[in-house]
């Protein structure tokens, strides 16, 4: 396997535990692992951009991405494969140059299409494909960081 030219990630179930938390006033909360920021840094140290692609659309994700200097943020995306095809075309790379970690049915087609695919431990779709890697960490526990570390330690 060659090194990726782009690393993409889902959010809920990968950077978070997949839960959606609401308080009595309707505020939504998400818990992120600080370890995943190290994955973004390591990719950037290797000259590789990082992108988030999620069907959710929240300011929370935008804030986290801005803080970590994530290169691409695509929210409200329901056809992730088509969105990534478009991005690859704009970047002049192929799907085989992409590494992606996702955890649910909406990630399945993209996971099957990219060069390097991963699932966090306990992903909903575990058993529905053979990813390149399954992390030891669950979503929200640093699964993205572990995936990026695995990419650069091979």
Image (spheres, helix red, strand yellow):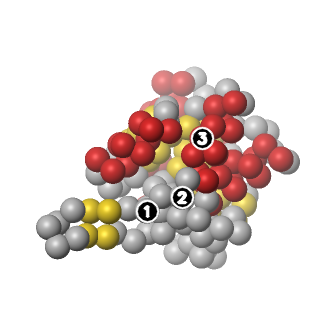
How far across and down, in percent of the image, does residue 50 sit?
56, 37
Relative placement, left or right, of 100 versus 131 is: left
Residue in the picture at 60% in, 70% down: 138
Q: Is residue 85 visible?
A: no
Asked whether 95 or 33 is in front, the reply is 33
| 109 relative to 5, above or below | below
Disc 1 target residue = 31
| 35 relative to 119, above or below | above
Q: Residues within 10 Å of mark 1 (few under 14, many from 20)?
A: some
Q: Residue furthest left?
A: 25
Q: CA distance from mark 1 to mark 2?
A: 7 Å
Q: Residues within 10 Å of mark 3 (few under 14, many from 20)?
A: many
Q: Residues within 10 Å of mark 2 (few under 14, many from 20)?
A: some
Q: Secondary structure at mark 2?
A: loop
Residue 63 in which image quadrant: top left
Disc 3 target residue = 40
Q: Is residue 115 visible?
A: yes
């Amino acid at each position: 396997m060659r090194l990726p030219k782009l690393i993409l990630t889902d959010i809920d179930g990968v950077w978070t535990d997949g839960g959606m938390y609401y308080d009595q006033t309707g505020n939504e909360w998400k818990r992120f692992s600080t370890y995943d920021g190290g994955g973004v840094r390591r990719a950037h140290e290797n000259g590789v951009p990082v992108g988030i692609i999620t069907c959710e659309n929240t300011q929370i994700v935008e804030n986290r991405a801005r803080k970590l200097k994530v290169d691409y943020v695509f929210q409200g995306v329901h056809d992730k494969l088509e969105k990534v095809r478009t991005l690859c075309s704009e970047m002049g790379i192929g799907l085989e140059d992409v590494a992606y970690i996702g955890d649910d049915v909406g990630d399945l087609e993209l996971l099957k299409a990219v060069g390097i695919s991963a699932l966090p431990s306990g992903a909903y779709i575990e058993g529905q494909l053979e990813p390149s890697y399954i992390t030891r960490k669950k979503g929200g526990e640093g699964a993205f960081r572990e995936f990026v570390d695995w990419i650069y330690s091979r």
